[in-house]
């Protein structure tokens, strides 16, 4: 996982349009940049020669690529409203509204996960931990990793978690079967 700092990760775009990670001294792709962002890292992309900030352009390109691959998160009605907002007086309000909306979404998800923590008396119920893990995985899938610190477990952890969840589910199913008799 990329180190989370207050300072954005600086990516330089060379004349050849290649993107260069200044921290690791290697070239990166748009998907690499998307991964950094999903891991909670802010990025800044600048043109090496002119010094122009190209961050917005590249972030929009990442979103467009995800949308074009069928990973549709933005409903057509929202896209239409965004296009309209560029030509209306509401243009000055839209950025603040979108930022506040995403802040509320992140805060709500964080609070929901906190409510499912050990302070909740439901945690003593059999199978609660498996249910909590499933809900957390669902939230991560639905938000594309927008939750703070939601880079997701490493692949080997996912396999172990899946095995644990399967065992817990089998145990719950057996208990349910005994209870229904």
Image: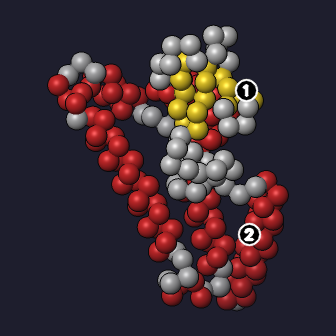
Q: Is residue 7 above or below residue 123?
A: above
- Assign the C terminus to one quadrant of the image: bottom right
Q: Is residue 82 above or below residue 174?
A: above
Q: Position of residue 175 (x, y in %)?
A: 71, 85
Asked whether disc 2 touches disc 1, contact meaning CB atoms under 8 Å apart, the reply is no
- The quarter holding residue 70 reads top right
What residue sits 38% from the left and 51% below the top?
103
What residue sits 41% from the left and 59% below the top?
107
> 54 or 29, which is in the foreground?
54
What residue sits 67% from the left and 31% below the top?
21
Q: Position of residue 110 (x, y in %)?
A: 47, 63
How would you rate the neighbour count of disc 2 (Cα within 10 Å): few for under 14, some for 14-19, many for 20 or more? some
Say left or right for 2 vs 41: right
> 18 or 48, which is in the foreground?
48
Q: Position of residue 54 (x, y in %)?
A: 50, 22
**Secondary structure under the numbered disc 1 in the rendered image:** strand
Give the number of the disc on residue 27: 1
Q: Is residue 67 above or below residue 111?
A: above
Most extreme residue toward the left is 89
Say left or right for 49 vs 31: left
Give the number of the disc on residue 167: none
Say left or right for 48 vs 130: left
Q: Nearer the viewer, mark 2 or mark 1?
A: 1
Q: Position of residue 63 (x, y in %)?
A: 53, 30
Label 2 belongs to which residue? 165
- Which of the two discs, 2 and 1, labels the residue nearer the N terminus? 1
How far is disc 2 from disc 1 in space, using C-alphas? 38 Å
Q: Is residue 169 above or below residue 48?
A: below
How would you rate the neighbour count of disc 1 (Cα within 10 Å): few for under 14, some for 14-19, many for 20 or more? some
What residue sits 28% from the left and 40% below the top?
96
**Secondary structure under the numbered disc 2 in the rendered image:** helix
């Amino acid at each position: 996982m990329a180190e989370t700092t207050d300072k954005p990760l600086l990516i330089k775009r060379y004349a050849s349009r290649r993107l260069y990670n200044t921290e690791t001294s290697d070239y990166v792709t748009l998907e690499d940049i998307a991964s950094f962002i999903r891991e909670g890292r802010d990025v800044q992309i600048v043109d090496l020669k002119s010094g122009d900030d190209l961050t917005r352009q590249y972030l929009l390109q990442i979103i467009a690529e995800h949308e074009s691959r069928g990973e549709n998160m933005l409903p057509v009605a929202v896209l239409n409203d965004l296009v309209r907002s560029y030509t209306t007086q509401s243009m000055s309000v839209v950025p603040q509204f979108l930022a506040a909306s995403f802040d509320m979404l992140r805060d709500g998800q964080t609070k929901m996960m906190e409510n499912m923590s050990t302070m909740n008396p439901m945690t003593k119920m059999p199978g609660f931990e498996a249910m909590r893990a499933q809900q957390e995985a669902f939230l991560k899938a639905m938000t594309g990793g927008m939750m703070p610190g939601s880079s997701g477990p490493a692949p080997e952890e996912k396999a172990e978690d899946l095995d644990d969840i399967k065992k817990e589910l089998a145990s719950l199913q057996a208990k349910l079967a005994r209870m229904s008799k």
